[in-house]
């Protein structure tokens, strides 16, 4: 079997290693800004008070906590979830995590990103060209709106800002495993097909801008812990008019061959937040990820308390436990061999898995 050839570009993308150093973190703590942290806290605590309860209060019965029955039974077995209350807490927590992971991305963009750059007259915002596209959808039917979105030229760009004569545009993904194969194709095609349009419209919106940076941003993780999809986008762009700018000085950065004015690269975790903090000088903003985490930590304390979230969660778990208790079968209703061969825990796990197969009555 022929050996697969290694791509040295992938090695460059994976070369950066973040090693935890308490001394470095202590130094970065001295640079965080209390005012920005308080601003983040205010925005996020309001979001948490409103949206965390919304993530679980719309779920009423067991059918609203439907999960993969095979994985559910396996997880219950290996973690010894053998009573309704423990199982209810497990179901609730798993669904709450999934709901928050889905909804939190947009809050990150709106609250976190909008507080930066640190040293600039403007902030990260929706691209005005994207807003113009969105405004053009007003009055269209749902079907026509959906059709227009598929042809959007700015769909993949989440935020942009201008610093000096360079425009920075970013597509924000929530984590190191978020991008899938379909999104790889979509983002590659978006850059390939729209870079000239982005450059032209940028000139119209910002006449003094000469250069564009397009950045694939992952809000947490490291270069070595992603699923490699963001790197595949860069590798594919090498086939569509991009080259490495300078492997030594700017590792992992691509630039268009035609104008040498459009760069594409990715920033992950700490490096992403440094980029958001000061896109033209990320090295001066290495502490920004700490501001994000501190703002969130304080906001969680306020938001959870203000919305009495803990009490509401406990009420939901009690409701789930009662429903699970009522779901169990009396042994007298079962065939004798099942009643004999299966113990109480096994029958409990079986009963909970049934919820995946019914719409009502569970």
Image (cartoon, rainbow, N blue to C red):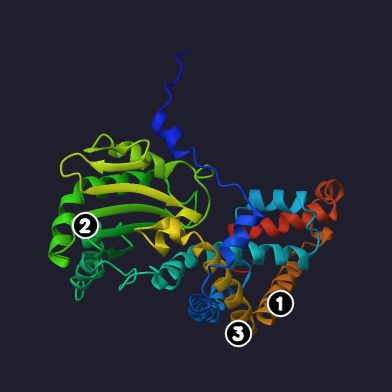
Q: Position of residue 306 (x, y in %)?
A: 61, 86
Q: Indicate the position of residue 117 as horizontal and vertical percent values.
A: 38, 68
| Element type where label 2 sits in the image | loop
**Image-quadrant location for residue 255:** top left
Of callouts 2 and 3, the N-terminal one: 2
Residue 327 versus residue 83: which sits nearer the camera? 83
- Residue that badge 1 annotates: 314
| Marks 1, 2: nearer the viewer | 2
Mark 1 surroundings: few (<14), some (14-19) or many (≥20) residues within 10 A: few
User: Helix, strand or loop at disc 1?
Assistant: helix
Q: Is residue 107 left or right of residue 312?
A: left
Per the image, label 3 sits on a secondary structure element best described as: loop
> Mark 3 highlights which residue?
307
Callout 3 environment at 10 Å: few (<14), some (14 to 19), or many (20+)? some
Q: Residue furthest top?
A: 1
Q: For the point 17% across and 66% down, which residue is it?
A: 206
Q: Which residue carries the number 2 mark? A: 153
Query: What x and y, as percent, mark residue 136?
Result: 18, 71
What whole-number distance in Å separates the C-alpha atoms at marks 1 and 2? Answer: 46 Å
């Amino acid at each position: 079997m022929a050996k697969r050839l290694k791509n040295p570009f992938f090695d460059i993308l994976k070369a950066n290693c973040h090693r935890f150093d308490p001394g470095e973190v202590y130094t970065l703590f001295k640079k965080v800004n209390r005012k920005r942290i308080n601003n983040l806290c205010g925005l996020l605590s309001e979001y948490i008070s409103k949206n965390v309860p919304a993530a679980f209060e719309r779920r009423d019965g067991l059918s609203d906590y439907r999960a993969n029955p095979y994985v559910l039974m396996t997880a219950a077995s290996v973690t010894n979830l053998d009573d309704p209350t423990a199982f209810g807490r497990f179901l609730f927590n798993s669904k709450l995590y999934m709901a928050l992971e889905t909804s939190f991305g947009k809050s990150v963009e709106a609250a976190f990103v909008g507080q930066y750059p640190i040293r600039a007259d403007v902030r990260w915002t929706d691209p005005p060209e994207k807003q113009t596209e969105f405004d053009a959808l007003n009055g269209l039917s749902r079907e026509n709106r959906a059709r227009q979105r598929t042809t959007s030229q700015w769909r993949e760009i989440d935020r942009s800002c201008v610093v000096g004569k360079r425009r920075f545009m970013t597509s924000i993904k929530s984590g190191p495993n978020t991008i899938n194969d379909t999104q790889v194709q979509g983002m590659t095609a978006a850059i390939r097909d729209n870079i000239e349009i982005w450059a032209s419209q940028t000139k119209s919106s910002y006449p003094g801008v000469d250069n564009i940076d397009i950045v694939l941003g992952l809000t947490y993780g490291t270069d070595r812990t992603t699923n490699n999809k963001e790197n595949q986008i860069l590798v594919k762009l090498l086939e569509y008019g991009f080259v490495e700018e300078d492997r030594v000085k700017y590792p992992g950065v691509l630039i268009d061959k035609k104008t040498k004015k459009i760069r594409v690269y990715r920033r992950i975790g700490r490096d992403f937040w440094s980029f958001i903090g000061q896109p033209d000088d990320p090295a001066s903003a290495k502490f920004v990820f700490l501001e994000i985490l501190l703002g969130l930590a304080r906001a969680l304390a306020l938001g959870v308390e203000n919305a009495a979230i803990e009490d509401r969660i406990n009420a939901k778990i009690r409701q789930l436990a009662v429903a699970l208790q009522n779901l169990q079968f009396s042994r007298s209703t079962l065939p004798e061999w099942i009643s004999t061969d299966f113990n109480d825990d096994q029958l409990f796990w079986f009963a909970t898995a049934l919820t995946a197969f019914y719409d009502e009555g569970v």
